[in-house]
Image (spheres, coloured by chain):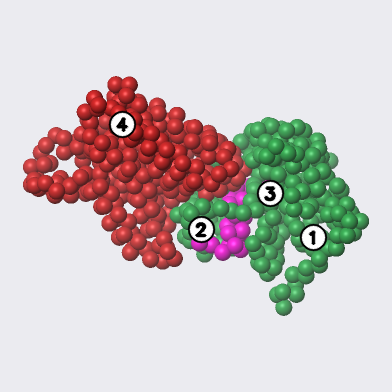
Chain colours: A red, B green
Amino acid sequence: MGEAAPLAELLQLPFMQRALLGGLLTGALGGLLGSFAVLRQLSFFSDALGHSSLLGITIGILLGLNPTLVLIPFAVIFALLVSRLVERSRLPTDALLNIIYSSSLSVAVVALSFVRTYQGNIQSLLFGDILGVSWLDLGLISALLLTALAYLGLTRRDQILLTIDESLALSRGVAVPVHRLLFILLLALVVAISIKAVGVLLISAFVVIPACASRLVSSHFNHYVLLAAGLGGLCAVLGLLLSGALNLPSGPSVVIVQLLGFLVALALAPRQGAIS
Amino acid sequence: MVEMVLEVSGLTVCREGSVAVDNVSFELAAESDTALIGPNGAGKSSLVQALLGILPHRSGEVRLLGRRLGRQGQLQASVRDQVAYLPQSFGVRNRCPLSVAEFVGLGWDPAGIRFNWRGSEARRMAVRQALAKTHCSDLADRLISELSGGQTKRVLLAFCVVRPRRLLVLDEAQAGLDSQMAEQFYGLLFDLRRSEGWTILQVSHDLEMVRRTCDGVLCLNRRLCCSGPPDHALSPSQLERVYGRGYVPYHHHHANHSS
């Protein structure tokens, strides 16, 4: 932990302003997608995708390309292949995802150890570097947030039916395979674009924790989704302010604030809590 | 001339590579109540899922309200809106935070892109009426994931009744209900069938209930073994054809439980 800087001074700095905006958008995006991913039992999928993204970043570094731009097609192709594999395999999904993410993470770390020219820092890949978020990153995150809001909002009825029961959704004419595919693609894009800010190890926390906290205190679906997105954005901003004020690592600070938010939700909703 | 709500001709359905339903043909007349019976693994759920387009069919033809169901389950939206399905098990995954009123409203909404989130007054009224018809008004603000088995079935009926439907397909609706709950559920279903003019196709293992409430029976064991009114289809000789030699029907008298 280094020397703390006055918060008011930090807020004047352009990189901190970009970081706060990036955190707000990334957190809201994670909460929005997470509210559906958690109920569809895709939490571990997003975790595996995040961990495996290091392989995509490594490929970018080995090819001498911008890792973020390589990561987007990598995450999309990887997500499609893995979801296809999960659908067809007779192995339990969690076991299969474990094999995939631990092996791709291992391959990536070994490959990275041979890269002598890489100027980056392995810690920022693992835990994110939200202070290094550029205007281009902010543009991409904003576009993705708008796309996700439009898609999930306009097909709200189909998304809810698909989330609660697939056969009921099919009987009501919902294009289940199409929506399942589009959601996986959206989740892969969110993971790929948020990795720089959040890191491969913490990305799933952005997807899972705000949604779980919101679930504990919500009794209407719209409230649940909006609260998950709001909590995601708020926790990210508070975590970054905490990180700036106390000179702590930014990604882990945000996750600790998310955890505190989850604990508050657990305390507020004992009757509907995770244990009852 | 009797209107046919459902016409099935030479239907064959495969599941996980093997034939689950083989060359089945039948018709359902408007406002009839028909039971689909047969042993476990006979293909009953596969058949109803194929009729609804949940499962694709390999060959044959299905016509719902005169419109052809595509092999991959494609069906004209206006026809699909008139068909409702009550599944055997209702997942409600991971305590989905959805109130009963919100859920029933989803039964009113058409498929596809929708701009009006809050819903019209007509939608709110339809939800209120559906909840009242199924005696669920007091459950409107409860979470669907917190309901008992009997309450869940009633709420599913509200989901079906929120829009005018012609055909209701039930897959073992009595599963998970005790005999008293099953009795109440079938009483409600019987009333709704009369008031709404529904045609019903229901998968059932409760032959006594079938004998008392249905006016037609389809006996399935991968193929259609027999069909007709309950007196004929549920005779000992026909039941042996469906369930195999030595089949002894167990007479389960629901009335005894309520006394």
Q: Which stretch appears magenta?
A: B145-168
Q: Secondary structure at mark 2?
A: helix
Residue B85 location (% of width, % of height)? 64, 48
Q: Earlier in the sequence, mark 3 or mark 2?
A: 2
Q: Is residue B155 magenta?
A: yes
Q: Nearer the viewer, mark 4 or mark 3?
A: 4
The disc label shown at residue B145, or none: 2
Q: Is residue A114 left or right of residue B38?
A: left
Query: CB atoms at circles 1 and 4 under 8 Å apart?
Result: no
Q: Is residue B240 visible?
A: yes
Q: Secondary structure at mark 4?
A: helix
Count of marks, rendered view: 4
The amino acid beneath tag 4 is: Leu
Q: Is residue B235 visible?
A: no
Looking at the rendered structure, whether the residues under marks 3 and 1 are on a common chain is answered as yes
The amino acid beneath tag 3 is: Leu
The amino acid beneath tag 2 is: Ser
Q: Nearer the viewer, mark 2 or mark 4?
A: 4
- Residue identified by numbered label 1: B207
Q: Earlier in the sequence, mark 3 or mark 1?
A: 3
Mark 3 Cα shell of 10 Å, populated few (<14), some (14-19), many (≥20): many
- Residue identified by numbered label 3: B168
Q: Chain of mark 3?
A: B
